[in-house]
Amino acid sequence: MQELGTGEAIARAKAVYDYGHTAIFASKSDPRLHLALYIPPTAAEGRKLDLLVAVHGTSRTSAFDFLNGFAEFGLYNDCAILAPIFPVGVFGDGARSGYKFLEEGDIRYDQAVIAMVEEMAEKYGQNWSTFAMFGFSGGGHFTHRFAILHPEKLWAASVGAPGSVTLLDPTRDWWVGVRDLEARFGKPFKPEELAKIPVQMVVGDADLENWEITHKPGGRYYMEGANDAGQTRPERLSALAQSFREAGVQVTLDVVKGVSHDRIKVLGHVKAFLTKVLSERRQK
């Protein structure tokens, strides 16, 4: 068997692990956190790409559903897909939901995602100073809160079926409202920046189970007003859409008939939204 030369072996390894569906990488800024990507193979020839960050739900396995589900979209729309992977129990306590609220212990998950994007932009020679973000369920938590805090980083946001929502309420503290946003995160809320982003909110009309999303006194994330946005995901997402619209944000609310809490069955609506936004973005 003929052995590969060093240069050829390196090129083969890059083709296998760095393009198409990539290996799982540890983040350089925080190796406790990981990421995987879909990179259209044309990027190896220097083609410039846009970026979609797709954020998993509580099980974390949806990261790979999104990498697979958006691969064809990415290939034909010149768009890379980056899926952060935030392990359950990163502090050894079994906690599942810290990332949904952007902070946990010494981790700022919003800053971690920005660092991941910067790392991968450098790796692939891309300009990803802004990107789109989609998340479903726990990822929907993360996406709308990231948009509230970092609107200047996004060219689009798609918020899928979050269990709890942060309304743009200046009379209530985080996470129910945004009154103490600057004190907590070091950045003020800028509704004029958020209003520049096209936002989709998507949920199934049969997504009605609320056993996991009802906050009770004594719970880790319970606070006054935790359940005020509604009893079900459709109700809470409708309240979020109204809150964003009152702040001047252009919101597309897609309530998908006959669909329960099923991330795969909403992806078609998300891809249609992102394709439209990409087309408009590239015509400017």
Image (spheres, grey):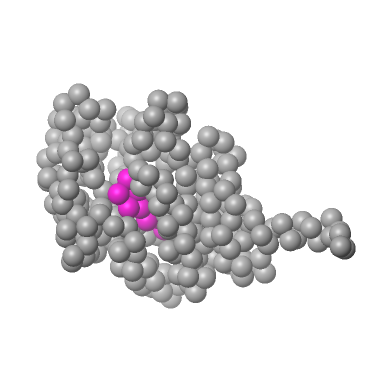
Q: Residue at x 81, y 61 (%)?
A: 8
Q: Does the magenta-highlighted stretch encompass residue 136?
A: yes
For the residue pair 112 and 227, the one nearer the viewer reads as 227
Q: Residue at x 47, y 52 (%)?
A: 83
For the residue pair 9 and 119, the one nearer the viewer reads as 9
Q: What is the quadrant of the N terminus in the image?
A: bottom right
Q: Tell me, yes or no, if residue 131 can be seen here.
A: no
Q: Residue at x 48, y 66 (%)?
A: 71
Please provide percent x and percent y for residue 54: 42, 54
Q: Is residue 116 depicted above or below 129 in this figure?
A: above
Please provide percent x and percent y for residue 151: 36, 50
In the shown orientation, is residue 157 left or right of residue 171? right
Q: Is residue 121 depicted above or below 181 in this figure?
A: below
**Residue 234 found in image quarter:** bottom left
For the residue pair 226 and 9, the one nearer the viewer reads as 9
Region of the chain picked out in magenta, as a range: 131-140
Q: Main secondary structure of the magenta part?
A: strand
Q: Is residue 230 depicted above or below 29 in this figure?
A: below
**Residue 226 found in image quarter:** top left
Q: Residue furthest front?
A: 1
Q: Tell me, yes or no, if residue 112 can be seen here.
A: yes
